[in-house]
Amino acid sequence: MYSEIINIGEELLIGQVVNTNASWMCQQLNNVAIQVKYISVVSDNEEDITNALETAINRSDIIFITGGLGPTKDDLTKDVLTKFFNTSLELNEIALNDISEFFKKRGKDVTKLNYLQAMVPKGFDIIRNPEGTAPGLIGKFNNKIVYALPGVPFELNYMFENHIIPGLKNENRNEFILHKTLLTQGIGESFLAELIEDWENQLPEEISLAYLPSAGIVRLRLSGRGDDKDRIIKEIDDEVSRLNNIIPEYIFGFDDDSLEEIVINILSEKGKTLGVAESCTGGYISHLLTCIPGSSKCFKGSIVSYCNDVKESQLFVPAALIEKYGAVSEEVAIAMAEGARRALKTDFSLAITGIAGPTGGTKDKPVGLVYIAVSSEGETLCEKHLFGDRRDRNIERSSITALNMLRKQIKKAV
Amino acid sequence: MYSEIINIGEELLIGQVVNTNASWMCQQLNNVAIQVKYISVVSDNEEDITNALETAINRSDIIFITGGLGPTKDDLTKDVLTKFFNTSLELNEIALNDISEFFKKRGKDVTKLNYLQAMVPKGFDIIRNPEGTAPGLIGKFNNKIVYALPGVPFELNYMFENHIIPGLKNENRNEFILHKTLLTQGIGESFLAELIEDWENQLPEEISLAYLPSAGIVRLRLSGRGDDKDRIIKEIDDEVSRLNNIIPEYIFGFDDDSLEEIVINILSEKGKTLGVAESCTGGYISHLLTCIPGSSKCFKGSIVSYCNDVKESQLFVPAALIEKYGAVSEEVAIAMAEGARRALKTDFSLAITGIAGPTGGTKDKPVGLVYIAVSSEGETLCEKHLFGDRRDRNIERSSITALNMLRKQIKKAV
């Protein structure tokens, strides 16, 4: 059973609004094993909406239209539906009553325009909308289901969660879909693909693999689809185990896990504390960590040492060490980590120093060179990395790489 | 001239990734008066991509395909283009050289898979990609232009900004479009709309206004469109001046200005230095400042004091002060700012303490309460703000508000 989404709205086509409705609906549908095959975005134009609907009816079983249900002139969805299904508008008493109540609660009278919102194409049922004035619509035609829903996210969300998804759960008993995403760090997409080529080639037919790269991280998404739920679950489980045996050193988590959350969780559980010393990442690692609610349990603070002065005064890095090896060096990274642990009085510390760019690089120490050190009681380790030449990417990749090194060291120590 | 976008990727159809590429591309195209008529999202499936391409070729003049150019098996765009335009793949030496250089810089060898990325359908030119390994493609067929671009946002963005948009500017010479955006801080969208209502009502017909709110900032975008270039330029100029007279206290910049860049620029010009003490924003202000290339000229460092200990030891905040007024108080914000200036030895300092949430609020000090202090030689000022109850939004709004307060104080002092 295939479904598709048609989002109507000029604001989506001029880039003023990001189409979060589509991705949210896809997530919801995916959870009940309804596969979304297509998303189309069209403007508030009768011909375009009609064409999109016609294409959709011919290739999909369930069609979700969002937008164009408001009270103003540019709202055309009901007109299109009426003409397309060769029907006419009629007053829906329940909708009119809901609209009246909606305004009464807010001390306002129903306007003529709002009255029009209670007019519904014959053959469609309404989906009541306590969050706004436009009711949703549902119609069934020759085994196809057509939904028309408001584009306002919280109105759409309400109807979807409370009416549409519960209804669809019953429609779709045949097929089962399962996704499992493995998160890897420290290896690029093409190197990863070579490492797991043999494994990829032996995947059962129902299981597909997608590579989703972002700065420093490659996500591997396994999708299983079929009518035998137990088999799909078992196959995905088996493949995850196999992959875990092939590349254990690169996998740090699953699905929506983040490195910063994993780090915060382990530390909080074990009652250990963390301090950070950042040079080239300029506060970004601290920001990632403190985005996690409850991070104050284990994260005590950071020193962003963007000049040698501050490295010396706040992190106790000897001026002679900086003089001898340079601020971007293994020796200074280690001194920063040990200094941060001492200054911030923590169990663990992470330090990073590098050349973010675009300037500041030399032949020996090019832009993208980064040293990361992790210090704990009795041990301080340092890694050297060479990233690219873009400042923003360097900051992000350095931070992700540093968090993963920290995660590994913490896991080893606690 | 109509354009349309085809985004390829299963991750978009299961809701794992929000389609920010589409909205970003729409914005860019809109800026050069290229109208996007349709967006289609399809999965990594040869038939679906082919159908989408066929539909697009029949109704649009310029087609942008994103995704499916990676080195792995699920990347099908080049296969589809080759079959659709009845051509074959050939090695592109420039692309191969770029790919080799890309890996050489990172101390790695080219893999077999990456070699395949240098294969290009005959009849297409490449768009070089210094950000990654997949070159973009451009082909012209019977007055239609087809672009194929990587789905990785920063690779796509680079090619779009540096190659595609400059090329398209010349394609579209009949209509003139001018956008000017005023950046405001410190006032919400609806209050702003009331303040400038009369001005908005008198705008000439060719000039339209859009409100673009984001955390802490409302951008007002004036767009002029027409065939009389000089008149459009003059009208936009006049309206900007008028608006500047109505709300001078809220406007901090234009177009792509950012508060952090303005702050860094003023300080660098005047040879003054800055230090930051962050509690609730956890490093985000430092991150924003250090994203600006050259920020090391004036930004010396930060202390992220996420616990009282660190406020006392690193920022010299007296324990008795925290005990008496609480860590989130005007008194502590001022002490943090003065302590940061002393510890980091800077001309200016910014300090922030607050309750980001979701927990930690009380009746007297609810989630969203924030104190911001700015200190300079002989003067330390403090502001109290109350933001919402969402952690991520609080961090962002607090940081933006703090940077604007800092900007105002620096401008006053230097």
Image: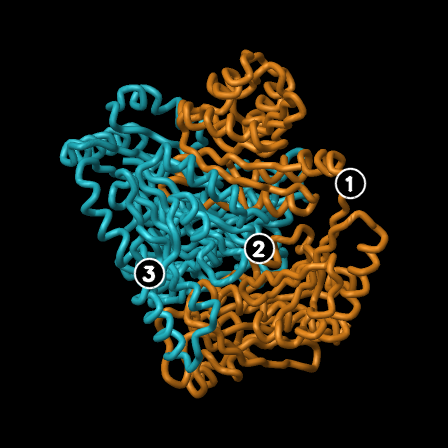
Chain colours: A cyan, B orange
Report the residue at 60% width, 14% height from top.
Answer: B122
Task: Report the disc number at residue B174.
Answer: 1
Disc 3 designates what residue? A158
Under circle 2, the secondary element is loop
Which circle, 1 or 3, is nearer the viewer?
A: 1
Q: To which chain does the residue with label 1 belong?
A: B
Q: To which chain does the residue with label 2 belong?
A: A
Report the residue at 45% width, 86% height from top.
Answer: B325
Disc 2 designates what residue? A318
Under circle 3, the secondary element is helix
Q: To which chain does the residue with label 3 belong?
A: A
Task: Say above or below: A396 vs A2.
Answer: below
Please state which of residues B304 and B293 is positioned toward the viewer in this rendering: B293
Report the residue at 26% width, 56% height from top.
Answer: A163
Residues at discs 1 and 3 both on one chain: no
Q: CA distance from mark 3 to mark 2?
A: 60 Å
Disc 3 crowd, CA 10 A, few/some/many (<14, 14-19, 20+): some
Please state which of residues B372 and A314 is positioned toward the viewer in this rendering: B372
